[in-house]
Amino acid sequence: MNTDFVLLLRSTRSQK
């Protein structure tokens, strides 16, 4: 699993 990807997804979700 890519941690970077998860982090990015979480960041985008937090922004919304």
Image: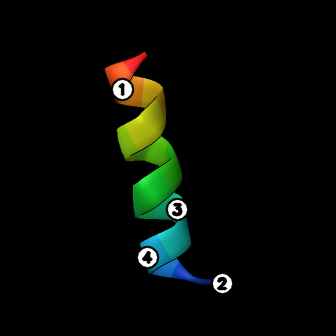
Q: Residues within 10 Å of mark 2 (few under 14, many from 20)?
A: few
Whether pointer 3 and pointer 2 mark residues with C-beta atoms closer than 8 Å, the reply is: yes
Question: Going by the image, does 14 lie left or right of 2?
Answer: left
Residue, disc 1: 14
- The amino acid marked with disc number 4 is Asp
Farthest residue toward the top? 16
Which callout, 1 or 4, points at the residue further toward the start of the chain?
A: 4
Q: Quadrant of the N terminus?
A: bottom right
The percent coordinates of residue 2 (x first, y second) are: 57, 83
- The amino acid marked with disc number 3 is Val
- Residue at left 43%, top 76%? 4
- The amino acid marked with disc number 1 is Ser
Tell me the SS state at disc 2. Answer: loop
- The amino acid marked with disc number 2 is Met
Residue, disc 4: 4
- Residue at left 33%, top 23%? 15
Q: Residues within 10 Å of mark 4 (few under 14, many from 20)?
A: few
Distance from the alpha carbon under mark 2 to that under mark 1: 20 Å
Distance from the alpha carbon under mark 4 to that under mark 2: 9 Å
Q: Quadrant of residue 5?
A: bottom right
Question: Going by the image, does 14 lie left or right of 9?
Answer: left
Tell me the SS state at disc 1. Answer: helix
Which callout, 2 or 1, points at the residue further toward the start of the chain?
A: 2
Q: Quadrant of residue 8?
A: bottom left
Residue, disc 3: 6
Q: Nearer the viewer, mark 2 or mark 1?
A: 1
Q: Quadrant of the C terminus?
A: top left
